[in-house]
Image (cartoon, rainbow, N blue to C red):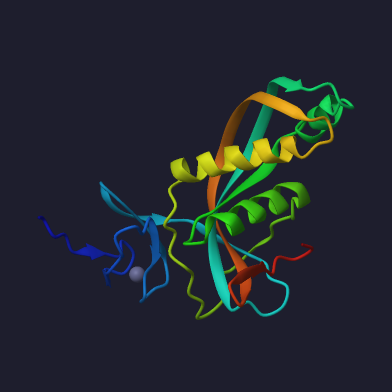
Amino acid sequence: MKLLLLRCPRCNHALSPDQDDQVVQCPNCRAAVAINEAGVELVNAHYAAPSGNPSHWLPFWVYLGQVTIRERKTQGGRSAEQEAQAFWARPRRLYIPAWGIDLRQARDMISLLIQKQPSLEAIDPPAGTSFEPAVVTPADGRKLLELVIVSIEAARKDWMESLDYDLRLDSEALWLFPATRKGNEWQLLLKKF
Ligand SMILES: [Zn+2]
């Protein structure tokens, strides 16, 4: 086994990521550092403006997503085809929770964010903040996102049987969202959310 000492590309401080960590914070200069097979790389992480006092900062992969519905089969209830087409007519911001969140909460959070489309306002990194490491890769997150898109369509009132659609994800960016925790539940503290 080859052990590689990883150092922050900005300040050269030693990093000690866990096995699943994709993006960690340098404990010294607080830079966001991606860890991959090629080594380490600085990531431009955007902090989103908070409402209230966050206790945590949570990583999300954020995209401009274009969903194109090719075919939507229903059992012939009231057609929600137009509703679906209107909902996806323009690109929407799509979000993948990237820290170690449980699957149920991740699904609920993706669905809420897709429907509410909060406006994200980037701020300077708040002094002294630390963020949760990102452990979900964009590729793994995409599968979850696809499940949520299908579940949003399945919730329309036309007894959908199957959905054939194309998903395009553009402008990948890492955002850090302000949050608090109530018991086991995460609560996002985004402005106007
Ligand atoms: Zn550093």
Q: How many marks?
A: 0
Q: Quadrant of the C terminus?
A: bottom right
Left of 2 or right of it: where is 95? Answer: right
Q: Is 169 situated above or below 57?
A: above
**Spot occupied by residue 90 in the image (x, y as percentages of width and height):** 76, 33
**Residue 162 position within the rendered picture, expressed as x and y whole percent measured from the top left:** 67, 25
Image quarter hosting the N terminus:
bottom left
Q: Is residue 71 left or right of residue 11?
A: right
Residue at 73% from the left image edge and 22% from the top image edge:
72
Q: Is residue 85 left or right of residue 64?
A: right
Q: Is residue 125 visible?
A: no
Q: 70 and 150: which one is in front?
A: 150
In which quarter of the view is residue 6 placed? Answer: bottom left
Q: Is residue 91 above or below residue 14?
A: above
Residue 163 in which image quadrant: top right
Image location of residue 35, percent across then percent down: 32, 55
Taking the view exactly as shown, the residue that stands out farthest to the right is 78
In front of the other: 26 or 20: 20
At 59% from the left edge and 56% from the top edge, which residue is drawn? 104
Residue 112: give x, y in percent of width and height. 72, 53
Q: Is residue 128 above or below residue 146?
A: below
- Looking at the image, which residue is at 70% across and 65% down? 190
**Ligand 1 is in which quadrant of the figure?**
bottom left
In the picture as drawn, the residue positioned furthest to the left comes out as 1
Question: Visible in this render: residue 144?
Answer: yes
Can you name the residue that lies furthest to the front here? 75
Looking at the image, which residue is at 59% across and 68% down?
124
Closer-to-camera residue (27/71) = 71
